[in-house]
Image (cartoon, helix red, strand yellow):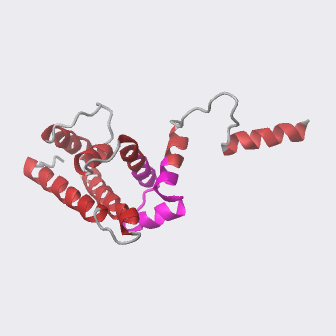
Amino acid sequence: MSTNITDEYLRKIIRTLKQSAMKHRSDIRPGRRRFGIYKYLTDVYQVYRDLRSRRIARTASRRIAKLYKLSIQKKSHPIRILIEASAGPEDARQKSRWTQALRYAFGWLQQPERLEWFFSVNGGISGCAAKYALNKGTTRRKKSGQVDQTPQKAIQTVEYHLVK
């Protein structure tokens, strides 16, 4: 089952996401700018789920990268490509955090309507990104001399002291 996607359709998707990003990031009312990003991420997540359900997420995102002349790695996730093409001048760390948070939500098969609730339950965007990184094993290593505060390490430490 092959679904043909035109370049015009992909440009329309990115144009809509850019408008969403501008609308939700430029609202200066108290609390709106900070939490408005949730609505933008919900839109990105919804587009990704739509493309994924049609089994064209990877090919469509590669074409978007080519259309917008994005310099991406070959292994870049389609969510990251959608964010790169539409987010604007955000720093790379922030885009990475958003991508990890959305990938974590997708791993839990969350509906786009429940994404804001999912973020609030899991400690916000950063909390979801941290949980994704912990599950994936991509967290930063602690410097020597620092205590590792991961739950598994704490359990092992308690068991060790109980055995003694």
The stretch of residues the image draws in magenta is: 100-129
In the image, residue 111 lies in the stretch drawn in magenta: yes
Give the position of the C terminus as an image quadrant: top right
Residue 11, x across and y down, in percent? 13, 51
Residue visible at 15% across and 49% down? 3
Residue 8, x across and y down, in percent? 8, 51
Residue 46, x across and y down, in percent? 30, 59
In the image, residue 49 lies in the stretch drawn in magenta: no
Residue visible at 21% across and 37% down? 70
118 lies left or right of 85: right
162 shown above or below 25: above
- Residue 44: quadrant of the picture: bottom left
**Count of numbered circles on the image:** 0
- Residue 77: quadrant of the picture: top left
Compare residues 14 and 46 and report the one nearer the observer.
14
Residue visible at 62% across and 30% down? 143
The outermost residue toward the top is 144
Residue visible at 54% across and 42% down? 135
